[in-house]
Image (spheres, rainbow, N blue to C red):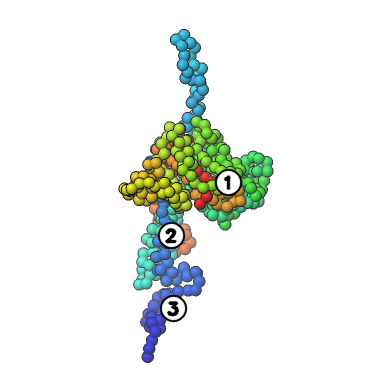
Amino acid sequence: MTVSLAEFVAQSQRGLYGRIFGPDFIKKANTLAVQYTTFAQTYGRKIWDALNNRTVTYNALKKVPWGPTAGWVLRTDRGSGRMRPMTETGTLPTIDVSNYVGVYVLPKIVAADFGVPIKSIVVNQLEGGMGDVLAAELQATERDFVKGINKELLAGSAAIISGGGTTSYVTNSTWADNSVSIGDTFYFYDVGVGAEETQGGLVSAVSSGTVTVSTLDTAPVDGDVMYVNDRAGFTSLDDICMDDSATVGGQLAYANVYNVTTRPAATYAAAASCSYNSGVGRPLTLELIDSSIEAIRNNGGEPKLIICGWDQYFNLERLLNAQQRYMGQEVYQVGVGDERTLAGTRTGLVLSTYKGIPVLPDADTAKSVNISDTQLGSNIFVLDTDYLEMAIAMPTQYIENRDYFSATSLTVRGLVYMMGELRCTRLDCQSKIADLNS
C-alpha cells in the first residue's frame, strides 16, 4: 500500500507523543493563537532573531559610575563689561558676575520582568521542546531590557495633538508608542490661548496613539502640542536637544530637561542648537549639518558623533556620493563605544564619517511630526560626547523569585533592573536637525 509522506509522519507520531504532549503538539494551527503549543514554542523561538535588537546609541555612549553628586552647574552667561581695554589712569571695568544654573539630577530605575510556569519548564526539557525555557526567556528579557533603554534614549520630546479630552491626548500612534512611557509627565501648549498648560499630564497608559493622563483643566484640541516635562525613565537625546524656541508642527513646545526649564536659543546659554522648519518637511542638505557643526564649535565644543535614522543615513550617502571625484578609495571603519560605523572611505563617501565625524544610523531615532500629526523623517543629532554619559548608580542586576505563595501560582519569576541616567553637562555643545523628509 502506497503511503504519502504526510500520512507516514502522522502514523509514526500517533500514540507516541499523545500521552505526554497531547494529540496536537506538533500540529500547526490555522490561527496565531498557538503560543500554548510546543510547536509554537519550539519554532517560534527561532523567529526571535527576526526582531531588531540593535542598540546602537546605548552602545556608543560612554558608561561612567554615578559618583558622589546629585547635579552640576551650567555657566549660562559670561557677565557683561567685565573686560575692556583701559588707559593707565582709567577706571576699572564694571564688576559683573557670571550667571550659573544649578542642574539637579537623580538616577532613574528601569526594569524588565518575566515569568515561566514550572510545567513549561518541565515539558520543554522533553524531546521536541525548546530546552531550558527559563534560560531562553531570561536571554530574551535581557535583550528587551537593553533595547528598551535604547528606545528611551532616542524618544521624541514633542508631537502635535489631534484631539483628546480632560484625561487624554490623541496623537500619532507610532510616535506615542516609541516616545511616551507610563509615569512620564507631558504638558501641552494650548494654541487657542497661546500658552502652555501645566496642569495634569501624568501618563498612566499609552495605546494606539491615545495617551491617558491625569485630569486636565482644559481639553486639548487639534493643533495643540504635547511635550515632555519629566521622564519616568532616562532622559532622551531629543529632550536634551531642545530650546525655548522649539517649534513642533509649527507650534511652540516648552520641553523640559532635568530642572532646566528655560533654554534660550542662539545665545551663550544652556541650550542646544536646534534647526526646525515649522512642521514642514524639507530635504536634508549638507548646509544643515554644517550649521550644526558650526554652532557646536562656536560654543567651544567639538562634534564627535552623528546619530540619525536609516532614512537620513541614505539621504546623506546620496548627497556625498553625487560629489565623488576620486580615483581610489581606502575602505575603513571607525569605532564609537562598543559600536563600529559601516565600512566607508576616507573621503567620507560610501558613508561612515562626515568631515571626520563618525555617523551611526539607529532605527530607534526619534522622528518629527508635521502640522497634520503625520510623522516625517528621523531627526539628526550632532553630539559632542565629551559632555554626554550614561551615569550608572547601580549596574544591571538579575533577581529570581521562586516564592509560589507570593506569586499565587506555580511560576518562576525573574527581574532585571538598573539605576542610572543620561547626563549632559554641556547642553550647548549638542545639536539637532528636525523637520526632515524621510
Residue type at mark 2 is Leu
* Count of marks overlaid on the render: 3
Q: Are marks 2 and 1 in contact (CB under 8 Å)?
A: no
Q: CA distance from mark 3 to mark 1?
A: 58 Å
> Where's residue 16, x and y in %?
37, 80
User: Horizontally, is 227 left or right of 403 in the view?
Assistant: right
Residue at image mark 2? 51
From the viewer's side, name the closer residue of 390 and 226: 226
> Where's residue 360, x and y in %?
41, 48
Residue type at mark 3 is Pro
Q: Residue at x 40, y 38 (%)?
A: 386
Residue at image mark 3? 23
Q: CA distance from mark 3 to mark 2?
A: 31 Å
Q: Secondary structure at mark 3?
A: loop
User: How many neighbours does mark 2 have within 10 angstroms: few (below 14), some (14-19), or many (20 or more)?
Assistant: few
- Give me the disc on residue 299: none
* Whether residue 180 is visible: no
Residue 54: quarter of image: bottom left
Residue at image mark 1? 279
> Where's residue 280, x and y in %?
57, 47
Sequence order check, earlier mark of 3 and 2: 3
> Where's residue 2, x and y in %?
38, 88
User: How many neighbours does mark 3 have within 10 angstroms: few (below 14), some (14-19), or many (20 or more)?
Assistant: some
Residue 305 position (above or below residue 36): above
Q: Secondary structure at mark 1?
A: loop
